[in-house]
Image: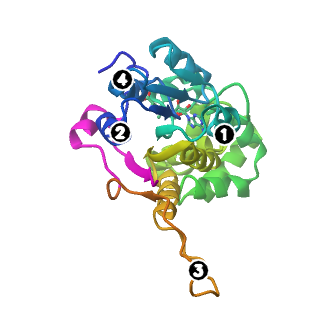
Amino acid sequence: MNDSSSYHIPVMGNEVVQWLVTDPYGLYADFTVGGGGHSKLILKQLRETGRLCGIDRDPEAIAEARRTLPDRNELWNIRFSEAESKLFSRFGATFSGVLLDLGVSSHQLDAEARGFSYRSDGPLDFRMSQESGETAAQLLARLSELELKEIFKTLGEDPQAGRIARAVVKARSETTIETTGQLADVIRKSVSATAQKSLPRVFQALRMVVNHELEELSSGLTVAWKFLKPTGRLVVLTYHSLEDRPVKQFMQALVQPPQTFSPLPTAPSPRPQGKYPIRGPLLPTPQEIAENPRSRSAKFRVIEKLV
Ligand SMILES: C[S@@+](CC[C@H](N)C(=O)[O-])C[C@H]1O[C@@H](n2cnc3c(N)ncnc32)[C@H](O)[C@@H]1O
């Protein structure tokens, strides 16, 4: 274990290092630096000129990474969607590897004041950066029953979405829903038999909306790919199907570009821009899952940019 393991234990660290770091003198980007767990493992593989640029939207994560990573590496408190405008003119397509380890860190989940978890009672916040944006409490107070149902259904994939949305609207007409404990109680009462399944689903759905996670993911993949030099690799770790699906589709379209119809029989087919160094997703070993249960749903995907 490394010294930031209490902040977050890096998932599939051996696989990240093995498939991401192909040039020990290269430049690498960790787009989700968190507590710096993966960054530290990457840095261990680098030689003299090898450098790392870390980004995270959470100022607390950047503060932790500044405390634990060597000074010669750059750390930026920005979102994926800001990376191109803030960093492309500085670096261009020079990265040998970019890592995206999606979702929230254990530190974010465990900090009660951040209000991410239904297991503890904290303010209903869910923002990865508490400096801006609407909180989950504000969202729950503002959205209509139909909008809430749609969110619980599409981003939580909860079959009880309608019932829970109705219960939220009824509860908020009696009192403001301000804490994770209050929301958890509303869910438990509305779907008592299946609450253990609905709790993580509804919390995940709200977190995704509050942080615009799918929009951010789409920007993150596009800009990460743009930053890579030819032969550079993009590694993405996902934790549920709603984030894994777009990653898989993004990579597949680069490996096998969709054929466009052309009236000219001689028109060239679009060229692949990437290849898979390994087929299909890698999964954590049973031993890793036993040691770090939060790794259990991880899927690891990697693609290499063609010359
Ligand atoms: C699972 S944690 C990363 C943990 C890290 N790999 C480690 O080993 O310590 C995910 C991190 O990504 C950050 N993050 C999520 N979405 C982001 C986005 N759109 N832009 C920048 N950072 C983001 C979160 O704030 C969180 O710190």
Decide if residue 53 is on the left or right side of residue 43: right
- Residue 14 visible in the displayed image: yes
Residue hosting label 4:
47
Circles 2 and 4: CB atoms closer than 8 Å:
no
Residue depicted at x 33% and y 19%? 2
Q: Which comes before the other along the chain, label 1 or label 3?
A: 1
Residue hosting label 2:
22
Circles 2 and 1: CB atoms closer than 8 Å:
no
Residue hosting label 3:
267
Residue closest to the eye, 105 or 204:
105
Q: Give how far across and how far down residue 217 sits, in percent.
A: 58, 47
The amino acid marked with disc number 1 is: Glu
Q: Which comes before the other along the chain, label 1 or label 4?
A: 4
Residue depicted at x 63% and y 58%? 162
Residues at marks 2 and 1, CA–CA distance in whole angstroms? 24 Å
Residue hosting label 1:
84
Circles 1 and 4: CB atoms closer than 8 Å:
no
Q: Residues within 10 Å of mark 4 (few under 14, many from 20)?
A: few
Residues at marks 3 and 2, CA–CA distance in whole angstroms? 35 Å
Label 3, secondary structure: give it.
loop
Q: Which comes before the other along the chain, label 3 or label 4?
A: 4
